[in-house]
Amino acid sequence: MDAYLDFARDSGVRLTFFVTGCYPSWTDNRDKMKPLVESGQVQLANHTWTHPDLTTLSEGEIIDELTQCENLLRNTYGVTGAPFIRPPYGGRSSVTDSVCAKVGYSTTTMWYGSFGDSGQLTPEVLLGEAQKWLLAQHIVIGHANFPTVTHVYGQIIDILRQRSLQTATLDDVYFGAGHNRHV
């Protein structure tokens, strides 16, 4: 997480982090992340508390997962993650969408491309995925789980510049620059 924040700060890229709240990196890096969140360069949204497949949970369990993560966002950063939810593993249904909407998470966010870095991989493989998926109007996901991406930030910026791409948060796209998510 720390290296992602350095990357955002140093490059100016705009990012939306989908927070899995049980991981200590969200509180451990608060002081470094909070200014980026407050400026709107980094947006925080909900990826649940413990990363379960929502389609396997009861309504109460889904609400608990979302509420615990939302409480972390509010108490640690003073922001809401609503209305954006990215269901772990892409696991969703009309039932899960409805339950999420009941607690303010009305916009289920899926992706159109991935760095493929939810597990260990080589920098070459990650850059191949970046070349494949970093295109206009794509939501591309990356994970802060492993350090591989930290070794290729410069090449990722080069791909963005060569393609004249501009990064954006979901708030930028849905609501325009300057949207206030403070609570």
Image (spheres, rainbow, N blue to C red):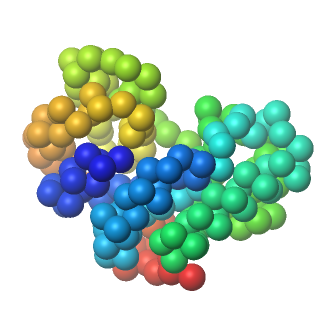
Residue for point 88% across, 50% down: 59
In this picture, is 152 found above or below 172?
above
Kindly tell me whether residue 170 is visible in this rendering: no
In this image, 113 relative to 161: left or right?
Answer: right
Residue for point 71% across, 67% down: 104
In this picture, is 119 found above or below 160?
above
In this picture, is 52 found above or below 69?
above
Q: Quadrant of residue 46?
A: bottom right
Residue for point 64% across, 40% down: 51
Instruction: Residue 105 in the image: state x and y as whole percent.
Output: 68, 61
**Observer-nearest of 1 and 18:** 1
Instruction: Residue 133 in the image: state x and y as whole percent.
Output: 33, 32
Quarter of the rendering occupied by the C terminus: bottom right
Residue for point 20% across, 60% down: 9
Q: Quadrant of residue 134?
A: top left
Kindly tell me whether residue 86 is visible in this rendering: yes
In this image, 53 relative to 80: left or right?
Answer: right
**Observer-nearest of 149 and 138:** 149
**Observer-nearest of 148 and 16:** 148
Instruction: Residue 41 in the image: state x and y as whole percent.
Output: 31, 66
In this image, 173 relative to 14: left or right?
Answer: right
